[in-house]
């Protein structure tokens, strides 16, 4: 199948999962994850889809200018503080804000650049030691200070749960993110409407658990190991 067929079948699966769970299709956005794929491959989709995501600033710096300027780009990988200044003008939204220090840097540099950066806070729902993201406990503690950062527009939460062979096994992690969001809503009176969760092999389960954004790469482009072949 070609890339366009893959994109269409992904959108069909999104629609079906939304319908199954009594949600409307416009509640769920698809971020097409184009990391590792060169601009000429990504270009095959850009007249059919407008939201793309990258995980590395350097790769985005090289790729984004080669593609139509009307596209919306999100950063989904760990952002080092020394790259914030270059990342902010490129990305409409940073989904991977994983520490208070980074949030403070984005706030400060956003102000210098005259921007109000939109962000999601990345939550390490299963508390995995080697993974980026706030633990739920750490985020609960940091929340008052995050809310006090005047330039930051905190729109929601993002998670990358532990890899499970069986998508159904991720359901508990997705549900945990939604319940944690509900708790933060209650405690801090912030809406946090967006829940970015679900990747190629488990996005339908994530939608059933309330995802408002799914991040899908290999189901559309194929195996990334083939990207540079
Ligand atoms: C690579 C990546 C994805 C997409 O993964 P696929 O399994 O290829 O769909 C989603 N989210 C993040 C944060 C990623 O780094």
Image (cartoon, rainbow, N blue to C red):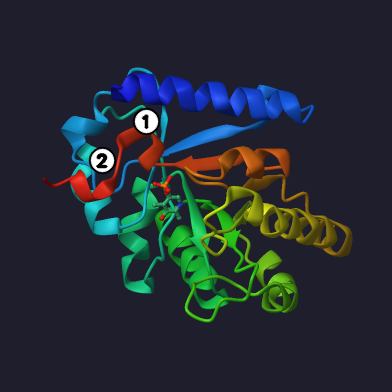
Asked whether residue 212 appears in the rendered view, the answer is no
In the displayed structure, would residue 26 be above or below residue 138? above
Which residue is found at the position 37% from the left and 64% from the top?
84
**Quarter of the figure with residue 22:** top right
Q: Give residue 135's position: percent from left, percent from top.
A: 65, 75
Could you classify mark 1 by the number of other residues whose Cα lies within 10 Å: few (under 14), some (14-19), or many (20 or more)?
some
Residue depicted at x 24% and y 27%: 43
Label 2 CB, ligand 1: below 8 Å? no
Q: Residue furthest right?
A: 186
x and y percent of residue 28 in the render?
A: 62, 32
Would you place residue 45 above or below residue 225 in this image? above
- For the point 63% across and 66% down, the residue is 149
At label 2, counting other C-alpha atoms closer than 10 Å, the crowd grade (few under 14, some 14-19, many 20 or more) is some
Query: Label 2 near label 1: C-beta < 8 Å?
Result: yes
* Residue 185 placement, left or right of 50: right
- Res. 116 visible in picture: yes
Q: Give the number of the disc on residue 64.
A: 2
Residue 131 x/y as whole percent? 49, 73
Instruction: Determine which of the numbered discs, if any, sits on residue 28 in the image.
Output: none
Q: Earlier in the sequence, mark 1 or mark 2?
A: 2
User: Which quadrant: the N terminus?
Assistant: top left
- Element marked by disc 2: helix
14 to the left or right of 220: right
Q: Secondary structure at mark 1?
A: loop
Decide if ligand 1 comes within 8 Å of the CB at mark 1: no
Question: Which residue in the structure is indicated by mark 1?
Answer: 71
Query: Does 163 sit left or right of 171 as displayed?
Result: left
Gap between marks 1 and 2, in whole Å?
9 Å
Which corner quadrant of the image does residue 194 belong to? top right
Q: Nearer the viewer, residue 24 or 208?
A: 208
Of residue 53 and residue 150, the one placed in the foreground of this image is: 53
């Amino acid at each position: 199948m070609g890339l366009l067929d893959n994109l269409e079948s992904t959108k069909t699966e999104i629609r079906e999962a939304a319908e199954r769970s009594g949600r409307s299709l416009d509640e769920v956005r698809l971020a097409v994850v184009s990391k590792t794929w060169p601009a000429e491959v990504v270009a095959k989709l850009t007249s059919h889809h407008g939201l793309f995501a990258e995980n590395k600033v350097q790769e985005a710096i090289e790729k984004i200018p080669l593609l139509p300027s009307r596209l919306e780009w999100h950063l989904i990988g760990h952002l080092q503080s020394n790259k914030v200044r270059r990342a902010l003008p490129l990305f409409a939204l940073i989904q991977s804000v994983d520490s208070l220090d980074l949030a403070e840097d984005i706030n400060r540099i956003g102000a210098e650049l005259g921007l109000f950066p939109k962000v999601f806070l990345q939550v390490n729902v299963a508390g995995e030691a080697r993974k980026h993201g706030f633990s739920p406990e750490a985020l609960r503690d940091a929340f008052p200070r995050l809310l006090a950062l005047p330039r930051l527009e905190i729109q929601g939460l993002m998670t990358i749960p532990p890899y499970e062979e069986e998508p159904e096994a991720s359901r508990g992690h997705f549900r945990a993110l939604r319940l944690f969001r509900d708790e933060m809503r209650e405690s801090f009176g912030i809406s946090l409407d967006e829940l970015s969760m679900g990747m190629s092999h488990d996005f339908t389960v994530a939608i059933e658990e309330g995802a408002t954004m799914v991040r899908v790469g290999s189901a559309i482009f194929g195996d990334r190991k083939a990207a540079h072949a």
